[in-house]
Amino acid sequence: MHELSIAQSIVDSAREHAALNGGRRIVRIGVRVGEISGVAVEALEFCFGMTVQDTDMDGAALELERIPVRFRCSCCAHEFHPVEFLGQCPTCGSDGATMIAGDELGLSFLELE
Amino acid sequence: MAERVEVRQSVLKENDRIAGELREALAARQILCLNLISSPGAGKTSILESTLDAIRGTSRRVAVLTGDIQTERDADRLRRFGFPALQITTGGTCHLDASMVRRALEEIPLDGLDVLFIENVGNLVCPASYDLGEDAKVVVLSVPEGDDKPLKYPGIFRRARLMLLHKIDLLPHTRFSRDAAVADARRVNPEIEVLETSCVAEPGLGAWLRWIEERLEEKRQAGRPARV
């Protein structure tokens, strides 16, 4: 349960960016959450609400974009969502795909008023 | 009218910044830093006890930071070997972050150390997200936990450089498949290295101790200016 500290980090970073953009009010924050980032999105939404409550960011929306795990075949470059991390390419059948998405945890955008 | 501003940065930017400072401070002194992560009860503290016991007969100097939600028990266990061991009591937080490590290191003199071990809070989920300035994350998977952990908790196996298959002497008493555990860990992380260890029976910790020594040597080679 580390979502509270993650929510706090999101709010701190958003404030920093808003300050750089003339100190405008933040109405929405976009965050990319990879499937294996270890973050429970429901818990993060709950903690975010608690973190901004009764502050200047009260009412700001948190828009979470879930990023599924994606592999790219090192043979034919086909991209696919693996079942249980099995690296076998469903198109050409070769092994040895590499993971290209799914462990991110990052800010993607802010909406400022 | 709201304006949308694109922002590309890690959510844990502040943690990553502090971790970067720690990494520089450790690199300047050529100290190897290993972050041990596992479920509660997998054997992190026992591995460290045996490791410190083996190292105390050598010229190597090490220190340990050990994280737990409550109690000083682990640090008490680890101090018996004559090396500095500091407990970080998180008071509820399920992982260590870089600022906790920075605070703890104010109490441990770094000069003269060869290796800094960080024993994370027992948890396979949250500690995976936090960079502590380490050279490598080491995930400990003990046989009684079952061989299905790499696919159930892929985040940490993805980020670990080394997996210790620990309490390996219990293999004959369980249905744990060593092949399945290794194959699944490599599905998530094709680069992961694997060593088998036990604190109480063969094969002991020899492979792990050699691995530490190799990583230390590697770091010192990398830190040395190239000869012209």
Image (cartoon, helix red, strand yellow):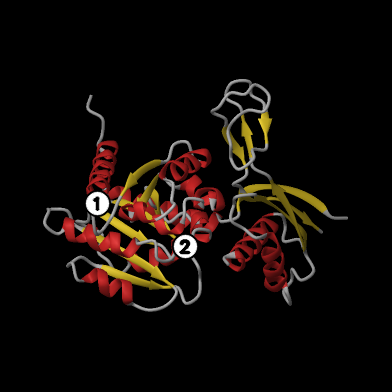
- Given the image, what chain letter belongs to the residue carrying mark 2? B
Q: Position of residue A41 (x, y in %)?
A: 69, 60
In the image, what residue occupies the spot 42% across and 77% down? Answer: B70
Q: Tell me which amino acid carries mark 1.
A: Leu
Front residue of A21/A107: it is A107
Above or below, comparing residue B93 to residue B166 in the picture: below
Residue B167 lies in what quarter of the image? bottom left
Q: Secondary structure at mark 1?
A: loop
Q: Tell me which amino acid carries mark 2.
A: Asp
Residue B109 seen in the current view? yes
Q: Name the residue beneath numbered marker 2.
A: B97
Q: Name the residue beneath numbered marker 1.
A: B205
Q: Position of residue B210 (x, y in %)?
A: 23, 44
Residue A94, numbered circle: none
Give the mark toward the camera: 2 or 1.
1
In the image, what residue occupies the spot 51% across and 71% down? Answer: B93
Q: Is residue B27 left or right of residue B19?
A: left
Q: Position of residue A78 (x, y in %)?
A: 67, 26
